[in-house]
Image: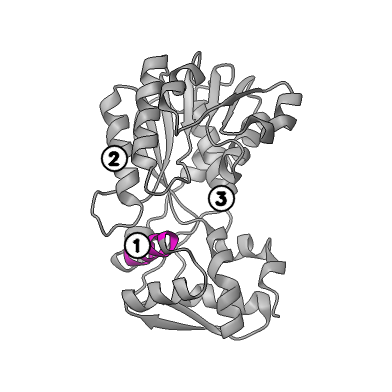
């Protein structure tokens, strides 16, 4: 496997959880020209102190992006947190990468990316992927499955109520640890040569019933699954404090779990990182305090 450890590598969103983990993985693997991109360079002062090139990368200022990407050979485009704005933000970033002479883009997408209006955040990923395909640049599309850490959002409420709500017909989701996905992205940035679209998954699909068992084991309290219709599931999430946009996205993920889109299992994490992905239960055990019964 070839390595681009000495090539100029830029990671966008480097002050976020995923981007920072990817930068740390690149450092651990000996990359010599890491460029950390962020809207707020002050947040990465520690990386600048280590000698990394920290650049302002503002997706809301597309005219500034070609200069921000100047001299970059390979780009890890971490999908932004701008729900509703991401198509404009990310397609502008792809165009800027092409203008700047970037040769290869690694993009963090989502499974079964498609343009359907009811597919949650998937249309944003679909159109970003389409822009990358049309750019003529080399690409690695990493369709990251649901992060296991997202259970930190609904897990504590499920423990408190003793009920975990999910859709009728759930067939399982191959939850992946965010750090595993970030290490895979770093590995792809360092080594991928051909253009591919790949699913990034954990080691096995996990059903809502299995999630409930893990939550019960961590908290010492019984948690049962309540299977409901889509409208009831979304309403319950919003009532529990989940933002409307995120509730819609989570509902779309659950729908895809029913259709089987999220039951795919691959070896992409191990292929790019050299490490097997963590099991869902082990990821949650790392956050045991968040699930302690109150």
For the stretch drawn in magenta, the main secondary structure is helix
The local crowd at label 3, few if under 14, some if 14 to 19, many if 20 or more residues have their Cα within 10 Å, is: many
72 shown above or below 212: above
User: Which range of residues does the magenta coloring cover?
Assistant: 245-256
Q: Which residue is mark 1?
A: 252
Q: Quadrant of residue 229?
A: bottom left
Crowd band around label 1 with a 10 angstrom C-alpha radius: few (<14), some (14–19), many (20+): some
Q: Secondary structure at mark 2?
A: helix
Q: Position of residue 39 (x, y in %)?
A: 56, 33
- Residue in the image at 37% along x and 48% along y: 84
Residue corresponding to mark 2:
127
- Which numbered tag is attached to residue 178? 3
Please state if 189 lies on the left or on the right of 27 as rendered.
left
The reply to whether residue 276 is in sight is: no
Label 1 and label 2: CA atoms lie apart by 17 Å
Q: What is the x, y in percent for residue 196?
A: 35, 34
Q: Earlier in the sequence, mark 1 or mark 3?
A: 3
Of the numbered discs 3 and 2, the one sitting upstream in the chain is: 2
Q: Does the magenta run of residues contain 253?
A: yes
Observer-nearest residue: 168 or 77?
77
**Callout 1 touching callout 2 (CB < 8 Å):** no
Instruction: State the residue at coordinates (48%, 46%).
Output: 81
Measured Cα–Cα span from mark 1 to mark 3: 19 Å
Residue 128 coordinates in the image, percent (x, y): 33, 37
Whether the magenta-drawn stretch holds residue 154 is answered as no
Residue shown at 45%/29% (left/top)?
Answer: 61
Left or right for 149, reference 256: right
Q: Which of the two marks, 3 or 2, is nearer to us in this view? A: 2
**SS at circle 3:** helix
Q: Quick one: 197 or 23, which is closer to the camera?
A: 23
> Is disc 2 surrounded by few (<14), some (14 to 19) or many (20+) residues within 10 Å?
some
């Amino acid at each position: 496997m070839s390595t681009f450890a000495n090539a100029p590598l830029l990671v966008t969103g480097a002050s976020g959880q995923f981007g920072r983990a990817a930068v740390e993985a690149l450092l651990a693997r000996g990359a010599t020209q890491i460029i950390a991109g962020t809207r707020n360079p002050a947040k990465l002062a520690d990386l600048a102190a280590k000698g990394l090139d920290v650049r302002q990368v503002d997706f809301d200022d597309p005219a500034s992006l070609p200069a921000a990407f100047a001299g970059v050979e390979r780009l890890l485009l971490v999908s932004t947190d701008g729900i509703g704005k991401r198509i404009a933000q990310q397609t502008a970033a792809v165009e800027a990468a092409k203008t700047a002479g970037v040769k290869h883009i690694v993009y963090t997408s989502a499974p079964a990316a498609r343009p359907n209006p009811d597919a949650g955040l998937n249309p944003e990923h679909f159109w970003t992927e389409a822009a990358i395909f049309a750019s003529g640049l080399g690409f690695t599309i990493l369709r990251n499955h649901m992060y296991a850490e997202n259970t930190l959002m609904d897990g504590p409420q499920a423990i408190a109520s003793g009920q975990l709500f999910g859709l009728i017909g759930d067939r399982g989701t191959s939850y992946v640890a965010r750090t595993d996905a970030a290490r895979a992205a770093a590995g792809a940035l360092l080594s991928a040569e051909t253009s591919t679209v790949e699913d990034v998954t954990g080691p096995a699909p996990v059903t809502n019933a299995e999630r409930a068992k893990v939550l019960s084991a961590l908290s010492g309290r019984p948690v049962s699954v309540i299977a409901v219709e889509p409208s009831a599931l979304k309403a319950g999430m919003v009532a529990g404090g989940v933002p409307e946009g995120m509730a819609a996205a989570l509902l779309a993920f659950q729908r895809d779990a029913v259709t089987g889109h999220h039951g795919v299992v691959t070896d992409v994490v191990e292929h790019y990182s050299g490490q097997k992905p963590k099991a869902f239960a082990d990821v949650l055990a790392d956050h045991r305090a968040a699930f302690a019964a109150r």
